[in-house]
Amino acid sequence: MKNSFNFSYRYDKFSDKEFTTIRGSSAENDYKVGQIVDIKVNRKTIGKVEILKIERKRIKDIPLELLKKDGEYPDHKIHNHQDFIDLINSFRRFHFVSSDLMFLTLFYLTWKV
């Protein structure tokens, strides 16, 4: 079982009490609802969250509003599903997402004080 989510950017969503993170389809096997995990930015812990809910969805079935909220950070905006796919691919060395048919895992999180 993994005990953290690592991020490359300080996303806008971190200022919200509850937020999501979208990971690869197999990530649902690495965590469980109710688990407390660290949030890290470039491997430095910035806080702890509780996992409220885990869902597996196709990219095309995730509302653009959620993708925007999940993937935007200073100087980077999401305008459509392809922008989000491009963001995901920027983090991958192999197995690039090439279609909106691919399944991803959504984690709904809340900050722990």
Image: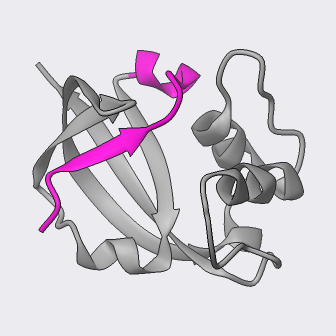
Q: Is residue 92 left or right of residue 80?
A: left
User: Residue 57 appears at what percent x and percent y?
Assistant: 57, 75
Foreground residue, 30 or 34? 30
**Residue 45 drawn above or below residue 97:** above
User: Residue 80 appears at what percent x and percent y?
Assistant: 88, 49
Image point 73% across, 73% down: which residue? 97
Image point 46% across, 48% down: which residue? 21
Q: Is residue 3 magenta?
A: yes
Image point 50% across, 21% down: which residue? 10
User: Residue 39 appears at what percent x and percent y?
Assistant: 27, 34
Foreground residue, 96 or 69? 96
Q: Is residue 29 left or right of residue 8?
A: left
Image point 36% across, 71% down: which residue? 27
Q: How is the image coloured?
A: one colour
Quarter of the image for the N terminus: give it: bottom left
Quarter of the image for the C terminus: give it: top left
Residue most extreme to the front: 93
From which residue to which does the magenta span run?
1-16
Q: Is residue 25 magenta?
A: no
**Residue 53 drawn above or below residue 60:** above
